[in-house]
Image (cartoon, helix red, strand yellow):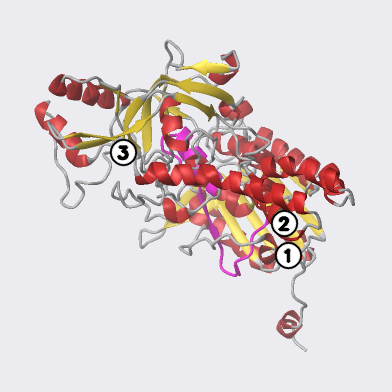
């Protein structure tokens, strides 16, 4: 029987890992290459190795500086061919990347070992050979992470597989690469978190939980998407990590952490199992609270339990209270639906057509509670009650056609591509947006300005602290992000009214980031005091202005209503737009 026949008779993969193996390579010192030494490759390699060992239980082999010759690297890779079928394998490389042009003008990628000599390509590792080695490793999941220049040359043109349930991902083979930049990009060796390179610093953040999804789920694909997004933001898109499968990938995904199962606490479960109706009834308000929280999985579990009790409990009084609580849970949704059907609209016709939506005065929940939103950022905390005075906000972001009227009046270039009139304007700085508001105020005699962070967030999520404008459950059909969008901006009304906020504002999540009036301060929420903060304005000064809402090139994590981004006021980002606010007349 030939070896190929033996492979065909192998049993299907099991939904678990029997081994976790990591080969960690970090090279700062290149005595023969004729290239400058690196500063953070060994530091990053050790940090990645330590995290994989301590957090995820990997068995780690490290090759650092003089220990990372071409032969030792190839020998270590060969040992990985002895991995078990149900193993996960991670190969991390931090060092110099090289390119060599073929006679046809194509680029071939190489990784430089410690003993790679300048001009002698036989002493370097051909990236193609390195990734083809993945198909010789029998482990079901193999992930290469390359913090090297031109690492994108390791990838082909296949699209990344769609995300599925962990049970499915764990039983399909995956061969994947996450590269620090595109095939033609030089990547940063420093300036990242904790003294690492930007890519490795954010890789460590992602593995530590920043890339995790609902209930802590963390996979290679989530990590790749997170790094593409975050490194791009940190480098103003000058360095854009690439994620994708290699030949032989069957749609699986390396799993670092499965989603935690939603369970009721032991006290709640015990009370519900009690034979005493009064005990069961006493715990129903707790179920109702859980059913209204931002953790969608827990909310669904609690609501289902209330429905079961309302339909089948032995006690009439318990059934009655469960159904009353369920009816109460539906009321905010009904109020939101009514608000969307009959918004308070202010219409401006000159000098531009502009619709503004009224947002009533009152309190709302601003920021994120990490116990309810597992993707909460540090600068979104602590969550607090904030009172905001009445205001009107643009129903849509400012469009190309609307901005062109201002540009023409300001003797600026005002070309709008045919068919793009109703798309949100982009490549506008904070200074441009503020100038637009000033022009509009002068033309109308009304006071127009950019929204404060608090105004923007209330308009986006309403009073109840929901994660997205429409509620707590993700739905890629209701907005334009990297998950379900076309990879570019879309007309401002395309996802309305399905994706509208409780007050009827459209595109508050996705499509384009929107400038706010406030200076950015990471610790702003921590400095606020009192049970209710009234009309916060942000810091008095700073270096960066706030952006809100996510965009077409970001994923769901940055589309949450509480997310805070920032940038310098004169930057014209490809996904930066804005909407206006007016005070009641």
Q: Which mark is residue 139?
A: 1
Q: Which mark is residue 441?
A: none
Q: Quadrant of residue 399?
A: top left
Seen at 49% across and 37% down, the residue is 561
Pointer 2 and pointer 3: residues touching (CB < 8 Å)? no
- Upstream in the sequence, badge 2 or badge 3? 2
Residue in front for this viewpoint, 357 or 54: 357
Give the foreground label among 2 and 3: 3
Q: Determine which residue is flagged by label 2.
A: 89
Label 2 crowd (10 A; few <14 / some 14-19 / many >=20): many
Instruction: Give the magenta-colored segment's residue range.
Output: 225-254
Residue in front for this viewpoint, 454 or 146: 454
In this rendering, position of residue 296 left or right of residue 273:
left
Label 3 crowd (10 A; few <14 / some 14-19 / many >=20): many
Mark 1 and mark 2: Cα distance apart in space: 7 Å
Q: For the C terminus, which image quadrant?
A: top left
Coordinates of residue 203 in the picture (x, y in percent): 61, 40
Seen at 53% across and 56% down, the residue is 154
- Upstream in the sequence, badge 3 or badge 1? 1
In this rendering, position of residue 251 left or right of residue 580:
right
Mark 3 and mark 1: Cα distance apart in space: 52 Å
Q: Determine which residue is flagged by label 3.
A: 395
- Upstream in the sequence, badge 1 or badge 2? 2
Coordinates of residue 85 in the picture (x, y in percent): 77, 68
């Amino acid at each position: 029987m030939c070896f190929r026949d033996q492979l065909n008779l192998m049993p299907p993969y099991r939904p678990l890992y029997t081994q976790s193996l990591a080969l960690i390579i970090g090279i700062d010192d290149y005595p023969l290459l004729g290239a400058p030494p690196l500063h953070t490759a060994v530091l990053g390699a050790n940090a990645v190795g330590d995290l994989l060992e301590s957090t995820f239980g990997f068995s780690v082999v490290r090759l650092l500086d003089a220990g990372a010759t071409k032969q030792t690297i190839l020998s270590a890779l060969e040992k990985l061919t002895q991995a078990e079928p149900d193993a996960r394998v991670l190969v991390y490389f931090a060092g110099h990347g090289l390119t060599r042009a073929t006679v046809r003008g194509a680029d071939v990628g190489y990784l430089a070992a410690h003993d790679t000599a300048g001009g002698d390509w036989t002493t370097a590792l051909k990236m193609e050979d390195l990734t083809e080695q993945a198909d010789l490793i029998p482990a079901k999941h193999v992930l290469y992470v390359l913090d090297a220049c031109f690492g994108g040359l390791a990838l082909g043109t296949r699209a990344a597989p769609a995300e599925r349930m962990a049970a499915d991902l764990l039983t399909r083979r995956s061969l994947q690469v996450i590269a620090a930049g595109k095939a033609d990009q030089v990547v940063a060796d420093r300036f990242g978190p904790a003294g690492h390179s930007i890519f490795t610093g954010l890789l460590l953040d992602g593995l530590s939980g920043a890339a995790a999804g609902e209930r802590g789920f963390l996979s290679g694909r989530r990590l790749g998407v997170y790094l593409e997004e975050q490194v791009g933001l940190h480098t103003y898109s000058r360095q854009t990590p690439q994620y994708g499968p290699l030949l032989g990938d069957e749609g699986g995904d390396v799993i670092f952490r499965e989603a935690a199962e939603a369970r009721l606490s032991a006290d709640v479960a015990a009370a519900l199992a009690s034979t005493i109706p009064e005990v069961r009834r006493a715990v129903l308000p707790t179920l109702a609270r859980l059913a209204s929280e931002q953790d969608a999985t827990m909310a669904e579990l609690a609501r289902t339990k209330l429905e079961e009790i309302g339909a089948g409990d032995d006690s009439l009084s318990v059934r009655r209270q469960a159904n009353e609580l369920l009816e109460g849970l539906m009321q905010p949704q009904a109020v939101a639906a009514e608000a969307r059907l009959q918004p308070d609209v202010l219409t401006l016709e000159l000098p531009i057509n502009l619709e503004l939506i009224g947002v009533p005065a009152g309190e709302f929940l601003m920021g994120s509670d990490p116990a309810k939103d597992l993707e909460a950022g540090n600068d979104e905390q602590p969550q607090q009650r904030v009172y905001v005075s009445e205001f009107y906000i643009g129903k849509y972001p400012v469009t190309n056609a609307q901005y062109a009227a201002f540009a023409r009046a300001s003797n600026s270039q005002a070309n709008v591509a045919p068919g793009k009139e109703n798309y949100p304007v982009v490549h506008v700085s904070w200074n441009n947006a503020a100038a637009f508001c000033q022009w509009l105020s002068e033309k109308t005699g009304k006071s127009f300005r950019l929204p404060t962070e608090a105004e923007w967030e209330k308009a986006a999520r309403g009073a109840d602290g929901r994660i997205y404008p429409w509620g707590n459950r993700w739905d890629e059909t209701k907005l334009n992000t990297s998950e379900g969008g076309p990879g570019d901006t879309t007309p401002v009304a395309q996802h309305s009214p399905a994706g509208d906020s409780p007050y009827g504002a459209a595109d508050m999540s996705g499509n384009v980031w929107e400038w706010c009036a406030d200076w950015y301060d990471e610790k702003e929420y921590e400095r606020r005091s009192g049970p209710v903060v009234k009309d916060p304005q942000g810091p008095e000064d700073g270096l960066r202005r706030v952006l809100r809402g996510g965009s077409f090139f970001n994923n769901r994590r940055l589309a949450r209503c509480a997310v805070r981004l920032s940038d310098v006021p004169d930057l014209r980002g490809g996904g930066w737009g804005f909407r206006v606010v007016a005070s009641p007349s």
